[in-house]
Amino acid sequence: MRRIILIIMFLSFFSKVNADNDSLAYDYKFKNINGGIIDLKDYKDKVILIVNVASRCGYTPQYDGLQELWTKYNKEKLIVIGVPSNNFKQEPGTNAEIKKFCETNFNIDFPLSEKVSVIGQNAHPFYIWAKNNHGVSAIPKWNFHKIVIGKKGTIIDTFSAFTKPMSKKLVSTIDKELKS
């Protein structure tokens, strides 16, 4: 019996929640790394890729792939937003240090938010919404967790840190939504 309960709990960890979608991603804003606002409602009818990022992570080289996605698909209405977070103790820098690191080492020119929490009770409201509307798969388990928001403002898929930005699976998801 204990084994069955464990299996059910394990499988429910990967299940998605049927969202009521009373609110959409467009209801959320981030402060950008320069002190302005990233208002997701400005990206209606576009595909948004939101990625929690960190400069001292084994996945930090994924910045190259995120920049490549941004460069390749921005004209086709893909918005990439990097969300620095120190939840996993790999982004200790200030906003100014993070910005300089990204621009100097990866030539990042896609939007970056200020450093925020992406997990727990102090998580940015967007991440709380993502969890409530898509389930535990929307909760970052590590840096470079990816959330794809479709043209209608709902989460269409999430990808773990080990999924590279230019992976066939992620690019296919983005392509499909861009063409819908």
Image (cartoon, rainbow, N blue to C red):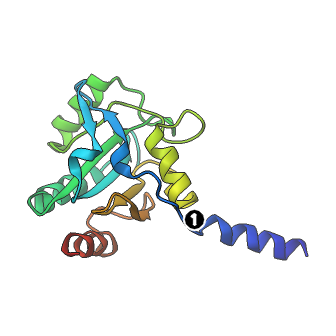
Residue drawn at the location 53% of the way across and 53% of the way down:
131
Would residue 131 be found to the left or right of residue 169 on screen? right
> To which quarter of the image does residue 73 belong?
bottom left
**Image quarter of the N terminus:** bottom right
> To which quarter of the image does residue 136 belong?
bottom right
**Image quarter of the C terminus:** bottom left
> To which quarter of the image does residue 113 belong?
top left
Q: Amino acid at mark 1?
A: Val
Could you say which is closer to the camera, residue 35 or residue 84?
A: 35
Would residue 8 be found to the left or right of residue 162 on screen? right
CA neighbours of label 1 inside 10 A, class few (<14), some (14 to 19), many (20+): some
User: Residue 98: x percent and y percent?
Assistant: 29, 30
| Residue at which label 1 appears | 17
Residue drawn at the location 34% of the way across and 59% of the way down:
149
| SS state under label 1 | loop
Decide: is 99 above or below 11: above
